[in-house]
Every structure is written in C-alpha cells, then in structure tokens.
Image (tube, helix red, strand yellow):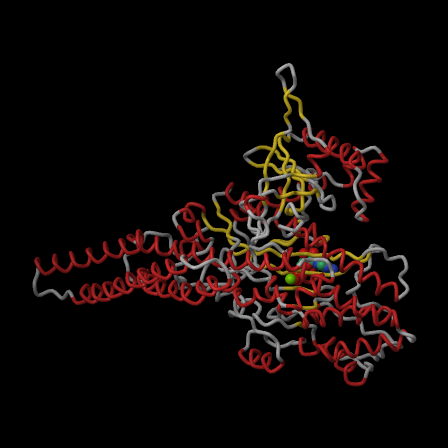
Amino acid sequence: MSEKLTDIFAIDVFNETRMAERLPKKTYAALKKTIENGDDLDPSVAEIVANAMKDWAIERGATHYSHWFQPMTGITAEKHDSFISPTNDGKVIMEFSGKELVKGEPDASSFPSGGLRATFEARGYTAWDCTSPAFLREDAAGVTLCIPTAFCSYTGEALDMKTPLLRSMEAISAQAVRILKLFGHEDVKRVTTSVGPEQEYFLVDKDKYMKRQDLIFAGRTLFGTMPPKGQEMEDHYYGSIKEKIATFMRELNVELWKMGVTAKTQHNEAAPAQHELAPIYATANIASDHNQLIMECMKRVASHHGLACLLHEKPFEGVNGSGKHNNWSMVTNTGKNVLDPGKTPHENVQFLLFLSAVLQAVDEHADLLRISAANPGNDHRLGADEAPPAIISVFIGSQLEDVLSQLIETGEAKSCKEGGKLNIGVHTLPELKKDATDRNRTSPFAFTGNKFEFRMVASSMSIAMANTVLNTIVADVLDRMADELEQAEDFDLAIHDLIKKSLTDHNRIVFNGNGYAEAWVKEAERRGLPNIKNMVDAIPALTTKKAIDLFGKHHIFTPVELHSRAEVLYESYSKTINIEAKTMISMAGVQFIPAVINYIKKLADSINAVKAAAPDIDVSVQTELLKETSKLLSKAEAARKKLEAVVKEASSMGEGADQAAFFRDKVVPAMEELRAPIDALEQIVDKELWPVPTYGDLLFEV
Ligand code: ADP
Ligand code: MG
C-alpha cells in the first residue's frame, strides 16, 4: 500500500471538488443552492448531474448504481441496477438518467413499516439526498455507484431513518438561527449539528465464529463463560495492537478514506478482542451515513483477514460490551460552535443559554433519548456495571456546576472554582478546561468542553434516531426560548431570568457523581428521574401525547409515523428474542446435550472398565462426576423443553406490545434457565468433546 493518504482520500466520492470539475458552472451553482438551502432541484439539472456522475463512476470502474437507503431495520439496504441499456444493433451503452438519480421505486413490501404500508400498496420511493455525496463502493460484486437516498411510502410517510433526521436538522437550524439573531448574529443563516460517533466492535477468528450458531444467528454468544482471565488486568485497553488486527485496521482505514470517511482514531478497548474507531465529526446526516459505511466496511474487511466483526452490544457475558459515543454540537454556517464557551461576556451568556437549553431538553424528554438508544442488545448493557446506567442525567463537571449553582442561587455567578472573578453580564466565565469536564466516564450524557457526548447509543444501531431526538428536543426548547426573548422589552434582563429559570427548573438532571453506584438509583428516584430498564418499557415514550405534540410541532414525525415506529420496535424486539431462543434450543438439542451424553458414556465406561480391571480401585471421582453431569443434563433438558414451550406460546400471540412483553418476561428468563446448566457443564465436560469454541478460544486467540 504505497498510496499517499492525501491522494486516496475521498477518491471514490462525488464531492464538491468533483462536481466543480465535471459540471457546467450553472449546473454546479444550481445544485449547490439545493444542497445548501434545500431549494427544489430542476429536472434538467438532475439530468446533467446524473450524466456527469455516471461518466465519473464508469471511469472508476463502476458497472452498477444503487439507491442506498436506511430502512427501519437500522441497517442499510440497496438494490443494484447496471448502467447498461441495449441499442438497436445488439450492443449496449451505459446510461443513467436524471430520473434514475432522483427517484427509485424499490418493491418495498418486505421492509418493516409498522403497518404503514399494506402489501397491496407495497410501493416505496427512494429519493436522492443530495446533501450526502454519492460514492463508489468496491466489493466482490465490483464497483457500485451508491446514491444516498431517503425512503418513503406512496403516501409520503417516512419509512427510513434518514428522513426524520433531515427534518430534525431543519428544525434545530431554524430555532437556533432565531436565537442567534437576538444576539445580533444577522449573518448566521444556518446552524448544523455536528456529530462524531465513536464505534466499538469486537474481532474474532472467522473459523471459530463459523462454529457457533449463536454468533452466526444472533450476533452474540448465548452460552459460554469467561476463562480465568477476563479484562481485570486492564491490559487490553489502549494496549499494543496485534499484527493481524493492525493489518485489518490498515485496510479498513484505506477503504474508508477512499469513500471520504475521516477515520481518525483507533485503539484497543477495555475487553479482550474489543476495539474502537472514531472518525472526525461531520454534519449529522453525513456522520450517520458514514457510521453505516464504517459498520459495513468493518464486516467486509474483517472477512479478508480471516476475522469476523461483532457489532453486537454484548457479544460476551462477563466482559464489557460495545456502544457508540455520539458526540454532538451545533455549528453556525459562519463556523462558530455555539457550545463553545466564549471569551467575552456576551459570548458567555449566549453559551449559557444554549447550555441550559440542552439541559432542559434532556430533562423534559429523557424518555425519548432512552428509546432512541434502545435495542434488544443494549438491554444487556444499560444499567449493568460497565456502560452508562439506564437513568439519564447530564455530567457538566464541577467547575460548570459551581457556576450554574451560583446562577441559580443568586442570579449571578461571582466566582469560580479555579480562582478568578466572574459575573455574568460583566466579566467573563473562566476559561473552562476541557480536561476538567471529561473525567466522568459513567455518565450517559456528558458535556465535554464544547460538545455533548451521548454515550448510551447501541453499537450496532443507526445513530440517526438518537440525533433526530436530540435535534428535535433542543429545537423545541430553543423555540420556546426564542418566543419569550423576541417579546422581551429588556433583552439583558429577560435572558438573565430565562437562564436562571431554566437552570432552576431542570437542575435535577445534572449529576456529576458515579452513575454506577446503587446510591444514584435511589437519588435519581428521589429527583423523579425516569429509570427505564429495558427496551419494551422504553417504547411507549414514542406515542405519548407529549411526544406526538413535540414531533408534530416541528414536522419530524406524524402521529401515524410514530405509531408505526413503535410497532416496528415491538416487532424487532420480539423477533430478536425469538431468534435467540430458537438458536439456544437448537444448540442445546443438537450440540451440547449430545456432547454431554458422550461424556457421560465416557465416565460410565471408565467406571466399568476400572471396576472390571481392579475391583478394589477407587472410582469415586468418576462416580461423582457422573452424578453431577447427569444432574446438570436433566436440568438442561428440562429447561430446553420449557423454553420450547414458551417460545411456542409467544409465537401464537399477535404481534405488538403484549407479545414483546411476553418475550421479555417469559422467554428471556427461560433462556437464562437453559444457559445456566450448560455453562456449568462447559466447566466439567472434557474440552475435546465440547462442540463449540469457548470464550477463551474466541477472546484470546485471535
Ligand atoms: P474522546 O476523549 O471521547 O475520545 P475525542 O476528542 O477524541 O474525545 O472526540 C471523540 C469524537 O468527538 C470524535 O469523533 C471527534 O471528531 C468528535 N468531536 C470533537 N469535537 C466535536 C464537536 N465540536 N462536535 C461534535 N463532535 C466532535
Ligand atoms: Mg469519547
């Protein structure tokens, strides 16, 4: 790999540079207006863009194009069409029209719609999202021109993750611009949300992976126990990277760079075989697309190196699981991050206003943030001892907390912890040290210097919903704040009162202590903060009157869209647990139980053989083992039968909330009941006879 990074970066992206090179000036200007201001795109412009895009793609070896979209499965979908078009003389030419660029009509009946789209009306539309650049993707199928698109139903309802995200970006921009105007920033036309998601993942040996049905079907181990060594030595975290993994990372980086993904940071994570990749932050929509590309690319590149990439939130019991830290901030089109504490009193007040708006938004809609980060895998993490707790609170650091509490008490802040005087409106805030705000790793939502870090997001999930919620809830608070401030006679006084009131009313959301401690659970309860322990309990937040009003007001989701999303989530929970349970039944039935029977026979044979050879020799060890193994075998078989019965009962129920609750309350405990004896047997049965690679094999022998 001799290419220079600067030469290969974004080589496969139809970005602004390429457009400027290849489009007539007028077309380029028209397209830019659409990208920047959301103006409608003239079909004749689309025609020219499509042609230029096709020529470029073909030069780079592309044979196919695909509308690339993100249905509610949370992963991406694509349907490939080749560029070929037959001519009269029996040959073909390569064609791609403006119509094909702008709109697609995949038969979409098999994507989840939550009842939005009856199968007889299965048509769905994909529509070009020109704010996220088209790119080329190379895999075994060749080179494909991928066009990021939104996906909606015949009647215009969003069927994807991207559409609401784009809508929410509009909403927060509009409201933030109103606020900034009040501060005299007439030049600010747009505010975009910048997002940098840190992606955690595991890599295991592909051959061993292929020997485990649970990894193949469920993406996580459903049986297995930690070997004597886990992560307690903390020797993997930031440890030196093994050659094989380094080779993988190198190829991954190059692949991502070519597609314009700014892969930046890579390191080993806390658990053995766990790693992290973080790109440099980008506009929310692009960051969300890029995160999908990162996940896809990780899986693809892993297979080139005899590895399998696990994106599941909890692939192994007993070591840390994976998440996604969603770093989020608001940046003006003039390049200013409004979450950056400023240097002048004026900037400080503006910063405090945005800060308090975020705190208020998180407090008012913690339930929505919770569901935005919920998936069945994350149920194993949130609230366990490693990841953020299921209770949402905000960490702001002791320095800021001190400033805020003075504001709440006296309406002004006169001092700060690190010395120096301050008085909002007269003096400036002390310069906040980034270090001082970034130490608490237990908080689900932390202010880290000039951005917020939402740490609950699930590793395998799209980040679109989390950012849609964040954008919308903050937009809503800014909207109400702008309403009040625009009416104010004395702006300085009004803003002072507004910040004080907001901070006072929502102070309960601020928590700087240890989020893992039992004491916090009690304290949070006292403060009235919701503690939503699992995905099924989190889903109703989407369809409360509060949520319907909020999303309706800002045109993010219609009530119908919200109900359909809730349905999709219930279904996806039930389906996931159903697959896991069935995988367990199968593994126990055709792998573990037969292996245990073999071992029992081995023990019995040994006892008989020893007795026959020398009747006075002690066979108590074999006999004890035989008893214990047989006892566990009976337990395992009983649990397997029970699990089979509850799964059958669950399948006979209609889809929806009740079924999902049944899976959670009846099927999940039955799964645990089956796992326990099998895991105990794994510790007893001859390793030679154990039918699958163990945790030790998977985690320490990559
Ligand atoms: P950490 O200490 O959590 O690893 P980093 O500074 O490495 O923090 O940042 C992690 C992620 O946050 C990266 O993707 C980075 O690009 C992103 N990030 C940094 N600044 C911002 C910002 N202002 N807005 C959004 N994301 C940001
Ligand atoms: Mg971080």
Vertical arrangement, residue 472 with respect to residue 155, above or below:
below
Image quadrant containing the N terminus: top right
Foreground: 8 or 90?
A: 90
Q: Quadrant for ligand 1?
A: bottom right
Q: Position of residue 610 (x, y in %)?
A: 12, 59
Q: Is residue 184 above or below residue 411?
A: above
The one nearer the camera, 389 or 67, is 67
279 left or right of 386 in image: right
- Which residue is at the front of the view, 694 or 289? 289
Residue at the far top in the pictured view = 89
User: Hey, which quadrant is residue 531 in on the image?
Assistant: bottom right
- Measured as percent of width and height from the top left, residue 355 is found at 76, 70
Q: Quadrant of residue 247?
A: top right
Report the number of numbered marks.
Answer: 0
Task: Identify the residue at image location x=32%, y=56%.
Answer: 588
Q: Nearer the viewer, residue 93 or 133?
A: 93
Q: Is residue 278 left or right of residue 684?
A: right
Query: Residue extending furthest bottom?
Result: 410
On screen, 456 above or below 165? below
**Percent x, y for residue 362?**
68, 69
Quarter of the rendering containing residue 88 = top right
Residue 245 in percent (x, y) is at 53, 49
